[in-house]
Amino acid sequence: MSLPPRAGETKSFAALRHPGFRAFWTGAILATTADSVEHIVSYWMIFQKFHSPALGGFAIFSHWVPFLLFSMWSGALADRFDPRRLMQIGLCMFMCASLGWGVLFATGTLEPWHAMVLLSVHGMAGVINSPSQQLLVHDIVGPRQLQSAVRLVSTSRTLGQLGGPAVGGALMVAFGPEYAILGNALFYLPQILWLWRAPYGPKFRTPDANVAPARSRLREQSWRDIVATLREIASNRTIVSMICLAGGTSLFIGNAYQSQMPEFAHDLGHGDAGWHYSMLVAAQAAGALVAAFLLESRGLVLMRPRIAIVLAMVWCFAIAGFAISTSYPLSIAFLFVAGLVNLTFSSMSQSVVQLEAPAHLRGRVVGLYNMFGQGLRAISGATVGAGGELIGVHWALAGSALLLFAAMSVLFAFAMRAAPATATSGE
């Protein structure tokens, strides 16, 4: 089993001390920025051309449903094939989507079915890229600096999400939406080219005598394969609890409330919804960035599953507090805390799952984690959006947070029954 850092080994921004990870991280920031720019430009053009709420709903559906349906399949591919090549395939699909939008915008031939196809391509690109990226990060930094790397990758997503709207808006103003999204495709190139010769992946791993025979015995990806993976990890309470943590937070809340932010901003901002909306979104991102900086600068490695669950419970209170708050400064504070603890427990749970997973099944286990942690966001809107229609979005979000808190309490009791001392958890 892979080990976490030993006492005295942790350093500030440990993963960034790896030259390979620095190059990977830079490319990841550019790719995430490009992803965000594509959302900004394409959603704006779809709204301008069609004014279709249904297409807006399909955009969310097509983004998360592939994770629910195909994450295990993608994880199995990452087990069998070079994750660098799978990442390149995913990034090339992202590029093709951007180029497709640009051509259709420039020629004025965009139809609803075109939009649905491109949105689906973008969603599939994400599910192909994600497990391979997580396995490649493990290959680059190794188990001892994995949590630092996971936190920094999460930070790169936050930076991309913050910078994307600014970059996308500037490109649209300077060149128009057509050329903005065509140029956006270039942001994916640095990581694609770096992956071509990056000295990581299966050919560069330390041989493991247990991996090759196990791979040869595995059937082609199917539901039987999924069941077999579930059976193999069922006895590992640490993995099970972290997957349930990811699934619970996505199912009950996820990021569904973010689509309701304009209403929260209107209720709190007294007429200036646009500015207040931006501040609310920025508060979460700021909390995540502060968490990453504090944890990385101090070289902290938190690998206890029970701590992750407790932090998720704190997240529940922060989200519930935001939902019922009538004070704008207090709402900002609640969202800041939510962003801070969310990055901490999510990076912790992902690191624990990777370290605890059997080497020959790591891709599948990561795929299972993504299926729960990201795929269930496709239906999390039912607890917030649909509930908001019945009792108002404020009480719907607060109720979802309380339900999640109850689920996390049960999960905490389950985790307490785990073995008191494991290499990964340190308990």
Image (tube, rainbow, N blue to C red):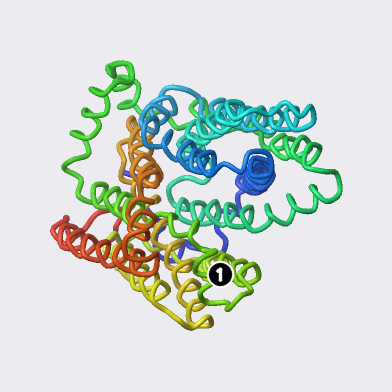
Q: Determine whether, in the image, residue 205 is placed left or right of residue 278.
A: left
Q: Is residue 110 above or below residue 336?
A: above
Picture residue at 68% right of the left edge, 29% below the top: 110
Residue closest to the far right: 174
Q: Determine whether, in the image, residue 377 is placed left or right of residue 1.
A: right
Q: Is residue 32 above or below residue 226?
A: below
Q: Is residue 2 above or below residue 367?
A: below
How many numbered marks does the figure carry? 1
User: Can residue 293 be seen at all in this image of the molecule?
Assistant: no
Q: Quadrant of the N terminus?
A: top left
Q: Determine whether, in the image, residue 318 is placed left or right of residue 402.
A: right
Residue 161 image point, x, y percent: 61, 54
Q: Is residue 223 above or below residue 67?
A: above
Q: Quadrant of the C terminus?
A: bottom left
Picture residue at 53% right of the left edge, 71% below the top: 294
> Looking at the image, which is closer to me, 400 or 306?
400
Which three-letter amino acid code belongs to the residue tagged 1?
Leu
Please tell me in which quadrant of the rendered image residue 91 appears: top right
- According to the picture, the residue beneath numbered tag 1 turns out to be 280
Neighbour class for label 1 at 10 Å: few (<14), some, many (≥20)? many
> Looking at the image, which is closer to me, 99 or 147?
99
Please tell me in which quadrant of the rendered image residue 393 appears: bottom left
Mark 1: secondary structure? helix
Residue 168 image point, x, y percent: 73, 49
Residue 49 image point, x, y percent: 68, 39
> Looking at the image, which is closer to me, 210 or 258?
258
> Looking at the image, which is closer to me, 126 or 291?
126
User: Can residue 335 be seen at all in this image of the molecule?
Assistant: yes
Residue 204 image point, x, y percent: 52, 30
